[in-house]
Amino acid sequence: MQSPSKHNRSLNNHLNVIEALVFLIPSLAISYLAYQQKISLQPSHFVILAGALALILGGLLFIRSLFAQLQSLHSMLETPRPAASNPDQLTPQLTQQAPQHDYADLSSAFKLMLTQYQQKEAELEAAMKRAESANIAKTRFLATMGHELLTPLGIVMGFADVLRNQTHGALSADQMRFANHIFDNGKQLNNLVQDILTTVRLESDEFKLDLQISNPSLEIARAIEASSATAEAKRIRIEANLPDNLPAFHADPSLVEKLLNKLLGNAIKFSPENGTIQVNASFLSQQHLLEVIPEAKANHGNTDPQPNNARSYLQIEITDEGVGYEESAHDKLFAMFEQGNNSRERPQGGSGIGLAISQQIARLHGGYLWSQSNGAGNGASFFVALPTKP
């Protein structure tokens, strides 16, 4: 390929030859005709000839200008350009090489991200193992301490009961009051330790339900009888509205008794004196249960299994006339060691374990526990639904 300078010289030589021929051919033709006296030149002929030569000269100048522009463009295309600092001025060669660098950077970034992800995954797995170990240690500690507390606590309550019964002599009024305080507070502490041990047992991987055929009417009657003394102390009536045709169902009797005792104890604790607690029972089909459960699940975040199409459910409802709760406090009701009112000024005591245990028991049976309230001061209703068959 010719260099730009050689190419430009060649174009100029051709242009000079063309210009010479343009002027030479007409001049020779006119001179020859004048020499042969074939034509007679008049002054007007010279004017026309001068005009024609001027047009020819103008055309030649235009052609020369056009050739100059073509030469400049040809030089720009043929001359190698240095790499530009501006990405917009990159030559096609550099533009083609750029994606290769982008792919390399992307590959390096992906490898770095993969390494970081693997590190985070390893850290998370290690943290989960530590959390699992800590949970196992916590469970063992609670179980050990619970059993260790029960022995001396039983002795304290036993001697307090001996004093209350005045087996070894009469007590004064103050002494009797002190003995009753010791026994009552020992009983509360005993219940708390028993609840903690129950929670540990329910969370154990080795725990299994002892399913038996149970009579729902009998189970509810036993729970009401067990709570009657506490209810009578506050002059609270417990009214059971049970249909006569309640069929038997499969459940762990000891756990169902504990669940009902917790729900009735909760209703008594938050009910005013001279109040009434209603206990209702009914059997629900799977379709009917779905009409009741979804609103509770949406509002309260239950993570229970979906109802089984082949099951029917025993629903027990316990309604009190107590303090109730606001909707914003519901999430705390079923959390361990939480209550709807956690302020120190709350009139009711308690550890906040009862409802959490009740929910654990319901879920272990494949059932549900939820509640409703129309606001503070309007009482509350607690519902438990247990499948009739395992």
Image: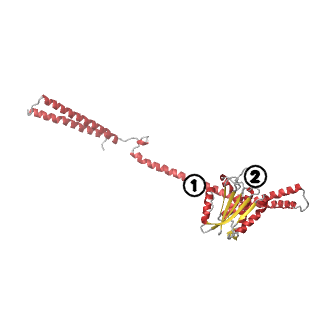
Q: Quadrant of the N terminus?
A: top left
Give the CA distance from mark 2 to mark 1.
52 Å
Q: Neighbour class for label 1 at 10 Å: few (<14), some, many (≥20)?
A: few
Q: Quadrant of the rendered structure where residue 205 is?
A: bottom right
| Residue 306 location, quadrant | bottom right
Is residue 68 or residue 43 the one in the foreground? 43
In the image, residue 225 lies at what x, y percent? 76, 65
Give x and y (percent) for residue 211: 69, 69
Residue 5 shows up from this direction: no
Residue at coordinates 52% horizontally, 50% vertically from top-left?
A: 109
Q: Secondary structure at mark 1?
A: helix
Q: Amino acid at mark 2?
A: Pro
Residue highlighted by disc 1: 118
Closest to the observer: 306 or 9? Answer: 306
Residue visible at 27% across and 37% down in the picture: 66
Whether residue 237 is situated above or below residue 248 in the rendered picture = above
Placement of 175 over or under 93, stated as above or below: below
Q: Give whichever of 20, 358 is nearer the camera.
A: 358
Counting residues from the start of the chain, the first of labels 2 and 1 encountered is 1
Cβ atoms under marks 2 and 1 closer than 8 Å: no
User: Residue lying farthest left?
Assistant: 37
